Amino acid sequence: MISPVHQVLRDGTRDRHETLDEGLALTSGDLDRDGYLNYLRALLGWLEPLERRLWQLDWPDSLQAHARAGKSDWIRADLAAAGDAAPVAHCPDAPRVNAADAYALGVAYVVEGSQLGGRFLAKQLADISPALPLRYLRGYGENLGPMWKNFLHYLDSEAGAQGHEARALQGARDAFDSLTVWLHSRQALRT
């Protein structure tokens, strides 16, 4: 069963999510190693500065922020495994999260939700090119389901119980919008 706040965020970001998913250069039929590494660098440029702020906020232990904070490290490990030492530009327009509130949870919804899509992409890419490093896309591995459910429970209990669904939705929309613009600017999103 989908939680009430999750439903609000899913419905309220559906068009943004579809635009991003359908436009990813990563999912084009002619993906090559360079395109994949470009995608990783672009994603890292958006995620790393955001993740540094997001998971350092004053979250309760139950959210497991420490376990959620390593996605940028996974991307860096993939780049290193591929021998890619190209510099990574950071996105100046990633959402600003300053407090462990509903807005930050909306942003985190996009970051955490990307792990679900990553699992699907990892399977696709492993079939196409088994030599690609896929640590980031494999994400939480076997812990994906429990981590996602834990996040949704916290999202619902905090944003939903306090009536801040609209603020969480704004955070999710801002995250999708800034990520889409950034990936496009880095040629990781088809026009």
Image (tube, rainbow, N blue to C red):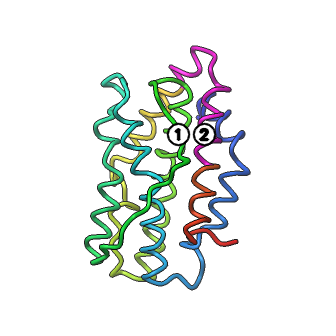
On the rendered image, what quadrant is the C terminus found in? bottom right
**Residue under the image location 34 percent in, 22 percent down:** 60
As helix, strand or loop, the secondary structure at mark 1 comes to helix
Whichever of callouts 2 and 1 sits on the residue coming sooner in the sequence is 1
Could you say whether the residue bearing mark 2 is in a helix, strand or loop?
helix
Disc sitting over residue 41 in the figure: none
Q: Position of residue 87 (x, y in %)?
A: 36, 68
Q: Which mark is residue 172?
A: 2
The answer to whether residue 179 is above or below residue 161 is below
State the image quarter where residue 73 is shown: bottom left
Q: How many marks?
A: 2
Mark carried by residue 109 = 1
**What type is the residue that disc 1 sits on?**
Tyr
From this view, report whether residue 82 is shown above or below residue 156. below
x 46%, y 28%: residue: 98
- Relative to 160, is 119 on the left or the right? left
Q: CA distance from mark 2 to mark 1?
A: 6 Å
Report the magenta residues as a range.
156-176
